Image (cartoon, coloured by chain):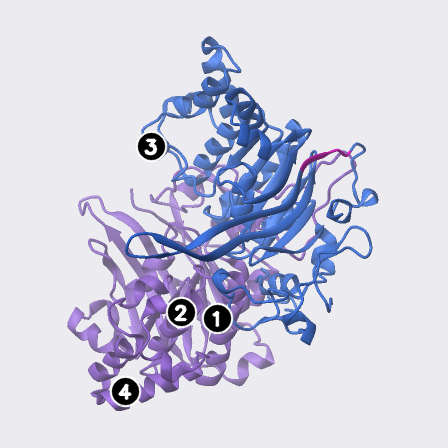
Amino acid sequence: MAGLAAETQAAAAAPRPPEATASPAPVLVSVENLRIQFPPWNAPVRVVEDVSYQVRTGETMGIVGESGSGKTLSSLAILNLLPPPARIAGGRILFEGEDLAAKSQAQMQKLRGRRLAMIFQNPGYSLNPLLTVGAQLAEILKVHEKLPRSAALQRVEELFRLVGITDPGSRLSQYPHEMSGGMKQRVCIARALLCHPALVLADEPTTALDVTIQAQILDLLEELKQRLGMSMIFVTHDMGVVARIADRITVMYAGQVCETGDKQAIFARPSHPYTQALLASTPRIDKSYAVDAQGRRERLPTVGLAATPGQSLGGGCRFAGRCPEAVPECTRLVPQAAAIEPGRSVHCLKRGSAGVPGHG
Amino acid sequence: MVDNLIAPAPEARPRAIRKPLLSVDGLVKSYPLHRRGLFRQKVMGEIRAVNDISFRLDEGETLSIVGESGCGKTTAARSILHLVTPTAGAIRLGETDVRATFERDRRPEVLALRRQMQYVFQDPYLSLNPRWSVRQILSEPLRVHGLVPPAQWDGAVEALLERVGLPAEHADRYPHEFSGGQRQRIGIARALAVEPRLLICDEPVSSLDVSVRAQILNLLAELQEELKLSYLYISHDLSSVRFLSNRIAVMYLGNLVEVGEVDEIFARPRHHYTAALISAIPVPDPTHQKPRDAIKGEIPSVVRRPPGCVFHTRCPAALPICSQQAPPLAAPDGSHAFACHNPR
């Protein structure tokens, strides 16, 4: 919550750019100090630690991180879909005035698929192979909106058309295995949109797809966002994808937030050493790499990433072990959010963050 | 014919001495398409996974083969090493006729050939024997090829580990004790054990995390310079290709559609598929003007290859001729070859 307060203060104090004052969209979801832990419970594994971020209506929040950063778990927690034995050990998830973290599975069941929807990484695994796509999507409408079968199928067909599925009428009676990966992902997007959800969570929705199909799906999501004004949390490891699709970005490392802010600002002026290292080390297609006369090739900068220790999940800043700027306090104190620009905060002791003693 | 067309342009190469190492001419790999009958299988046709591709790789150079899944890039690489037996075509490594050597199947000859070209696999989790220690994994090629007397294996293993940036004392660990990036280093060390001239790297970084990718790419660049290695780098990830390659060959549905110097291909792609592929890559820069060359539709099945140019069903600039006649791979300016009736 410290993060949110700091962010709001900074936003109020600094003069806002004119376009920002035009429409301050209301906050739709607010994740506050979320903690997720795995057993043993007497010394829990703290896979997500004090994660806070907000998503505004009509906005796409990109959550970027590598494997083990907690990006997927923190978004699954919003849907109360954490894989057992993981559990929420603290924090709140405020959505439409209610705390989702305190809800029972039965209460969540009413929200999932209706107000909150999910698009998974692998469309092949998230569709039922034994049912036609029409039948499994119509079932959602039957459960949530008590629609009769024919009306439900009609609505599914409309959505198939919306997400660019060719020949939507005849696709209804196809099974998932009869479709390509890109087509299945379109079905999954249609499934997510069936009941006009307020928030769509997309967990690496294009990672399993070929690049030209990925480009089509990203275009589709962008277009749907414009047309339906939907809010989205987009989880990915790909800085390129997030640069295309997100409005704001949260960078995560080993279960902690590194920084949050507008996409343009983060890419133009990455503040956290991890974000800086990640952006610098990513090879780019729009850059020519020099080869000198002896055939020596330019190297990718790996400062801050050179060592690959097992990620520490202990107290302090978890990037400290690899950080080129780390000071002794970094391994002991957990950096809190520090506002560095309007709408932008960073968690780093060297950048003005307050530190609180960590666990263990 | 194709040989001189798609060889690298002399003036574009910085290094003084250039000798062709690997030349592939008219490589075809097809699989029979069966229909199972009651008593016997009927051959209904064939799937051409690799359709008549030709290219050349010079010593000390990296040639990348890029394309999407199913384009035949891995099959082409595996055919060169005879991990799958090619259907037709000529493959030469230096002075050696690769296909003839594998067909004669005399062990010393095959070993001598395999010693010169080694494979780095995509998945470092599947390509290391989980029951073998790193020492066993790295000694095995030394034993098979008999390059080093057994008394010196330990020293050789330790030198290999250090060469790829792993501590020598990790030799007695097992693959599960290493991270993905470290395992890929072990896979590279195993390939280097027999001192090859050519490394065929099949998506060596695509299963790795972003921060580990850069380290493995730097390692590959370093090894190439120190050991004068040539790389055939197979990838769908154009950003790593741009970093590591001298030249690029683009494949689509089993065909080679464009070959050229790396900067030339990225700056001026002539084939519409190459342009679409490049513009589909998301650039980590929100101010990047995305060129709008997005192609519609999906890759057709290899079982039903479109007639004429294989790309005409998705091409934004297709002409009537494209659906009738396959364009040949040709290089009007000498070095940048493309197969298109209506180039950009």
Label annotation for residue A185: 2
Residue extent of the magenta highlight: B18-22
Residue B273 lies, in percent from the top left, at: 63, 64
Residue, far front: B39
Quadrant of the image containing the C terminus of chain B: bottom right
Q: What residue is pinned by disc 3?
A: B130
Q: CA distance from mark 4 to mark 2?
A: 20 Å
Q: Chain of mark 4?
A: A
Label 1 neighbour load within 10 Å: few <14, some 14-19, many 20+: many
Letter of the chain in blue: B
Q: Quadrant of residue B269?
A: bottom right
Q: CA distance from mark 3 to mark 4?
A: 50 Å
Identify the amino acid type marked 4: Ala
Q: What residue is pinned by disc 4?
A: A152
* Magenta stretch, overall SS: strand
Residue at (57, 62) in percent of width and height: B282
Asked if badges 1 and 3 are on one and the same chain, I answer no
Q: What residue is pinned by disc 1?
A: A217
Identify the amino acid type marked 3: Pro
Can residue A56 be seen from the camera position used here?
A: no
The answer to whether the residue labelled 3 contacts the one labelled 4, judged by CB atoms less than 8 Å apart, is: no
Q: Colour of chain A?
A: purple
Q: Chain of mark 3?
A: B
Q: In the figure, A224 relative to B161: above or below? A: below
